[in-house]
Image: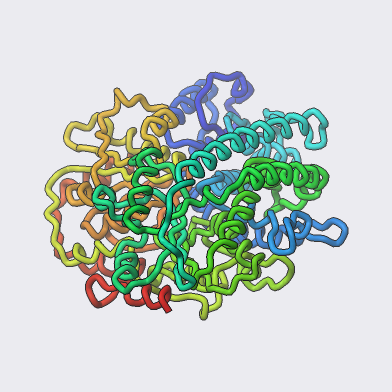
Amino acid sequence: MRVLIVYDSYTKTNKLSGIVASDNVYLFALQSKKQITESYVSMLRDSQCGVEIINTSKTVNDSAGGIRQSYIRFVAELPYKIQHKNNNLKEIFSIDKYASLWWFSLIAEKSTYKSDILTRLAQLDAITETIKLYNIEKIILISSCNKLTTAITEYAIGKSILINHTLPHKRLNSIATKIIIIVRQLISLLHYFIYSFCNATTIRKEFANIQRTHSDDNSLMLITYYPNLDISAAKEGRFTDKNYMRLQSRLAEEGNSVTMIAIYVENNAITRREAIRYAKTFITHGYRIYFLDEFTTPRIQLGSLVAVLFSAIKFILLEKKIKEAHVIKDYNIYALLKDDWHSSFMGATCYKGLVYYKTFKNLLSKFKVRKYLYLLEQQAWEKAFISAKNALNLQPAVLGSQSGTVSPMLFSFFNDPSEIHDTGGYPIPEPDIVICNGQNSYNSMMESGWPREQLYIAEAVRYAYLEKYLGYEFNKTEKIVLLACSISIHESSSMLNVLYEALNGNPGIEVWIKPHPFLHIEELFKYSEIEMKTCTFKIKNNPVGELLQRARIVVVGESSVCIEALAFGCEVFIVNSPEWISMSPLIKVGGSMIKTVSSADELQQNVQRIFIENYDAAERKTEIKRIINEFFYFSDSVDSVQRFYDLVSK
């Protein structure tokens, strides 16, 4: 019998007791720790069966690339596959004539930060393709992921394949199961309601008596995350947003009036108390800054809470139809998305979307401005903002600027062209102008069907400092490997696991870890099941530029540090792993300085080879300039942001 064992951990189990010498066993690991696979090989050796280890790092990542466009199209078509009384999904979950909960949902957002759908889908696709390739007759599942287990089990039952696992949940229409789901979502909803209610109340109280300078009708409204600050400038009372530094200076020099709307995001570098204190100082120095939470009233929050309950009733009645519409290829993926659906239409995500929409309506009704500018990441709050602007019939143009890099696997940035060109009810809330920070992101938006007349390329303001390093020859003599963590604990953990297995305790190589500002390093180690006290890696909180000047190799995922590392003459390692797909912006970029590894052994071998070779800075210059200029546009005139300034000022 041909048996497929799918596992993400090692456990001594009687599930393998039925394997005999005549069986052919295929091991499909959902994790990258080599010792776990070796333990299964050792256990199976006693049965004398044939054993083949699937290269799941490659298989899963290949599936992610292969399923990418199909999934983006699936999401675009989904609202029209579900009809009730001649209304599609967007209409069923409409808030009013101008906004639909569909656009605020995790399903429509496709965010790889907020959901693990892309990785789970890639794993499911890779497993089903492996089943077909090897004509698998039996599946043994040893997985802690219930939703992946459910999806595989449903597939196996549908294909009459033996499987050792029963569904982890009762049938979808079971009353008991639905009650459990509703209670779970209600608890999550109430928890977030209390958390957000307290936060908004605190912000309103802190700034209730703070006077701002008068806002004129010719002001630019700039919506940004806070506190993403230049700390040295903040200590001097100057507000410098890292996403807009040179643009912000140019606007001030030319006397442009700017109203800043700050969306507070927790930051490890600055406490909430410090962030509020800095904001008050900025305001007293003449900066016109408002927090979005100041416009979130108790009435908005309570009204949104009630609206979630009505949405939940609709969803419960439609859930069976929704599940039936989730077929891709020959498998159903609803089990992978079920949690996202529940949160989006009967839980915390639903509540967030409603609050954002109503809060932005309240905010925008109080200001007359010339233009709106915000950071374009295609998140739900952005769509709530644009929907609110449309509901109020406000005429000023909305400009969305891309501040970072755009990976092909950041699905939230991409749409099927049918979504962009849809002129029916509740079309996608989109900006009037998209400001791309380079040719790469421009091409990405064109791929999604955005009209050429809405797309502009302007200076990569956030990365302008890289210009001075492009002609610099670094002398890399130290054997230093830098792990640049991303905002995602899942991605950071997958890289840390491989790096730990490859280089921990290596006496000749120094490994540094640079935490992401929004990721707690202790939580990362705990999630990765690695003891910090046994790890020889050093935690570095220095500015990333300082670390890149000394590091020769940088292990990095989705973070734009991968491009910055090239500017500093570093070799960049992309890690493919089965537990989290590669999100690197460089996955489709060729170059001798970019290496892709799929195991700890491969990483170790490449690191050792590079440190033996002499570092030749001169031969790298052309390649570095080519790649960076593909991603980022810099003006010919040093320190100029003329293109960007013209777009926002005219």
- Tally the marks: 0
Above/below status of 213 relative to 622: above
Specify whether residue 85 is in view. yes
Determine the image quadrant of residue 568: bottom left
Left or right: residue 353 versus residue 250 is right
Q: Position of residue 174 (x, y in %)?
A: 82, 32
Left or right: residue 62 versus residue 141 is left
Determine the image quadrant of residue 497: top left
> Toward the viewer: 52 or 242?
242
Specify whether residue 130 is in view. no
Left or right: residue 558 versus residue 123 is left
Q: Position of residue 474 (x, y in %)?
A: 14, 57
Q: Residue at x 15, y 60 (%)?
A: 617
Q: Position of residue 271 (x, y in %)?
A: 37, 38
Farthest residue in the right direction? 85
Q: Residue at x 18, y 46 (%)?
A: 611
Q: Residue at x 24, y 70 (%)?
A: 639
Above/below status of 213 relative to 420: above
